[in-house]
Amino acid sequence: MPDRSTSALVIDHLVKDVGPVPALEGRMLRVIHDVSLRAEFGQVTVLLGTNGAGKTTTLGCAQGLTARQGGRVELLGTDPHDAHPQLRARVGVMLQDGGLPPSWRPIPLLRHLARLYAHPAPVDELVDRLGIDAFDRTSIRRLSGGQKQRVALAAALVGRPEVVFLDEPSAGLDPQSRTVVFDLIDELRREGIGIVLTTHLLDDAQRLADYVYIIDAGRSVAEGTVPQLLQDHSARSSGSGRIRFEAPRGLAGTFTGRAGVTLAEVSPGSYVLDGPLQPTDLAALGAWFATRDVMPAGLTLSTATLEDVFLDLASGATAGTRR
Ligand SMILES: Nc1ncnc2c1ncn2[C@@H]1O[C@H](COP(=O)(O)OP(=O)(O)OP(=O)(O)O)[C@@H](O)[C@H]1O
């Protein structure tokens, strides 16, 4: 069982340069300017960011794979950069490109990895759970992207890690495998493992995240639970909620909403109530229907999604600045 007196991972004002970069005449490029985050045990912490935002680089520093130029990193209570190799046995890593030896077959590879740990997870159970036996006669190099992903996840979990890093875990998975992987992640969370997951798939983040950090151009720009991020977004933006319905024509001018909440007839007989909607706006709309004796058709309510939050916050810029 993990020691819960510390966080699984703490990153404080991380700074990271890469290079020297030939295209910059050998200068270094600052790709992480200021990233802070905290991942707790028994939670899925999601790093969200556009391509090149700095997620993989941040994870590399978190795992101690690469030196940093500034900031503090504590993985399982220790600075991973100068930690004892034993720290590695307590950490599971699923890399974006798999990082698996291409000539091995999946099950012998997993059995080999299991022998490196004092208390490995039962390989047969992982194989069964992730449907790996269906393609065990194939070497890693010939596996499909989704099959490789499943082997990479099994490899990350075989040592019974206390914290696990999953870089784009659902990339390339068909819907069925995606469900299997998500169920497994839910189970790891219930077992108290700290899960740090990077993705740019907003559905994945919305489905899995206990806490989200949004990284943009090498900086942390927002954090919170999904409901908190949605709430902050709706406070920042008008038009974050929308109710659509069909009703007789020409009624829009008879509705008076709160400040910022407007009813428009967007095409004959099709209405949209738009604005920073609150429950009182639904009540006002219901009362308006009653006084007009209108029974609306096709009434739908849509609110902001994590995608709206992400598009609002992420500039799409990449992370580099010459040093
Ligand atoms: N060795 C390097 N030399 C030059 N640029 C680098 C190097 N390593 C990383 N970068 C740059 O740093 C930025 C951050 O890269 P990183 O891989 O961390 O992004 P990411 O958020 O994981 O992106 P993705 O979602 O596409 O995987 C990118 O602009 C990348 O091109």
Image: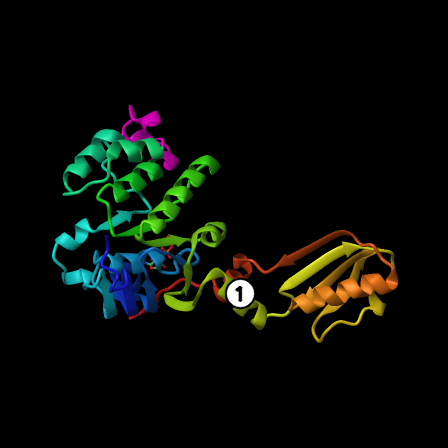
Question: In x, y percent, where is residue 33?
Answer: 33, 70
Which quadrant of the picture is home to ligand 1? Answer: bottom left
Q: Residues within 10 Å of mark 1 (few under 14, many from 20)?
A: few
Question: In x, y percent, where is residue 98?
Answer: 30, 42
Label 1 sits on residue: 312
**Residue depicted at x 34% and y 55%:** 42
Question: In x, y percent, where is residue 97?
Answer: 31, 44
Point out the stretch of residues depicted in magenta. 131-147
Q: Amino acid at mark 1?
A: Asp
- Count of picture labels: 1
**Residue depicted at x 12% and y 57%:** 84
| Front residue of this view, candidates 318 and 36 | 36
Q: Quadrant of residue 209?
A: bottom left
| Front residue of this view, candidates 97 and 261 | 261
Is any atom of residue 219 visible in this view?
yes
User: In this rendering, is residue 172 above or below 235?
Assistant: above
| Front residue of this view, candidates 25 and 281 | 281
Q: How is the image coloured?
A: rainbow
Question: In x, y percent, where is residue 21?
Answer: 27, 61
Q: Is residue 261 left or right of residue 270?
A: left
**Please, what secondary structure does the residue beneath circle 1 have?**
helix
Q: Residue pushed farthest bottom?
A: 259
Is any atom of residue 25 visible in this view?
no
Q: Quadrant of residue 214?
A: bottom left
**Residue depicted at x 35% and y 50%:** 190
**Does the segment drawn in magenta span residue 15?**
no
**In which quadrant will I find the C terminus?**
bottom left
